[in-house]
Image (cartoon, rainbow, N blue to C red):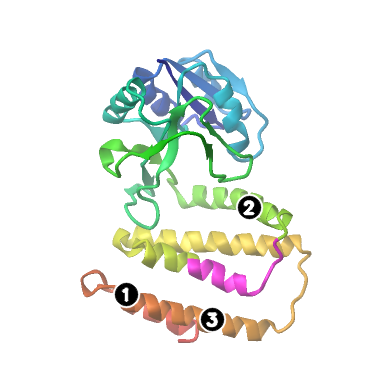
Amino acid sequence: MKISAVVNTYNEESNITRCLISVQPYVDEIVVVDMHSYDKTITIVKKFTPKIFYHENVGYVEPARNFAIGKAIGDWILLIDADEVLKEELGEKLRRLAEHAIYDFYRLPRKNIIFKSWIQHSGWWPDHQIRFFKKDHVTWGDEIHSIPITEGRGMDLPAEEKNALVHYNYDSIKQYISRLNRYTEIEAEAKVKSGYEFQIKNLILAPVNEFLGRYFAWEGYKDGLHGLVLAFLQAISLLIVELKCWELAGFREEAEVNEQLFLNLEKSRQDFDHWLKQISPSNNTGIKNVISKIKSKIGG
């Protein structure tokens, strides 16, 4: 039984050492597939493994996943990103799971560190991802954020910190905005290619629903200011996707803009009201005042 760690990289000089040091004690080989980094990533990687391959840089990782897995010789694959870390307790558990294989693939929780804080709500925890599996039992599509296709039986490791990969996600607003611009470009193009047509209502409803989902349904308010900021940033991301779909449609003018605007603002106000009523008194300190002010600005 052999385990291969598979890592995809692009300009990861600030992360890759930490990642490879963390996996080295628990795997039999490390395979790195790089998208033609121009920093010191490859120089660093060469200190850990000779198995380095290259893939065209398409702006996101999914098209390179299967290629990278195909270069591994292990019976089991540990798929880990350069900004992630495998802790000792989880590394030892994965070896035991491989030795006494009951399942064909495992979804691992991820401990997302964003703006120097572990985000435990807002849809960022437990963030289960298929990252440990028998070779040839999991494949990825080429679409951004595609859901992997699986064969056989799978299991979610319990959502406990000891079972989690540590994901050093966004470390600055600048980094978030940079990724946002890249990812929204790809997502908008994919939506339009699939037949989506821009609609004015989605300029309001898409970001508002994202904010309500992150902040209320997924209890982002329990993450304090981090939860509020991330709910806004995720909402902005959805807004930018819609605007780029409008751009791809040729910036065409629409009829009854004001009517649609006020209609959907009213719907959003009603949605805010609904979620405010769901918050228990023990969790709503200051929240209702903040959201009431937001509502007043959109016609409440």
Please state which of the two labelled residues, at mark 2 or mark 1, is closer to the viewer.
Answer: 1
Q: Quadrant of the C terminus?
A: bottom left
- Tell me the crowding category of disc 3: few under 14, some 14 to 19, or many 20 or more residues within 10 angstroms, Cα based: many
Residue at image location 20% in from the left, 71% down from the top: 282
- Tell me the crowding category of disc 1: few under 14, some 14 to 19, or many 20 or more residues within 10 angstroms, Cα based: few
Report if the CB atoms under discs 2 and 1 are less than 8 Å apart: no
Residue 62: percent from left, percent from top: 59, 38
The residue that disc 3 covers is 265
The residue that disc 1 covers is 278
The segment highlighted magenta reads 196-209
Q: Amino acid at mark 3?
A: Leu
Q: Amino acid at mark 2?
A: Glu
Q: CA distance from mark 1 to mark 3?
A: 20 Å
Residue 187's label in the rendered image is 2
Residue 37: percent from left, percent from top: 60, 29
Q: Secondary structure at mark 1?
A: helix
Of label 2 and label 1, which has the lower sequence position? 2
In this picture, is 294 found above or below 38? below
Please state which of the two labelled residues, at mark 1 or mark 3, is closer to the viewer.
Answer: 1
Report if the CB atoms under discs 1 and 3 are less than 8 Å apart: no
Residue at image location 28% in from the left, 74% down from the top: 286
Query: Residue 103 occupies which quadrant of the picture?
Result: top left
In this picture, is 280 found above or below 81? below
Q: CA distance from mark 3 to mark 2?
A: 25 Å
Q: Amino acid at mark 1?
A: Gln
Identify the main secondary structure in magenta. helix
- In-image side of 293 versus 11 (left or right): left
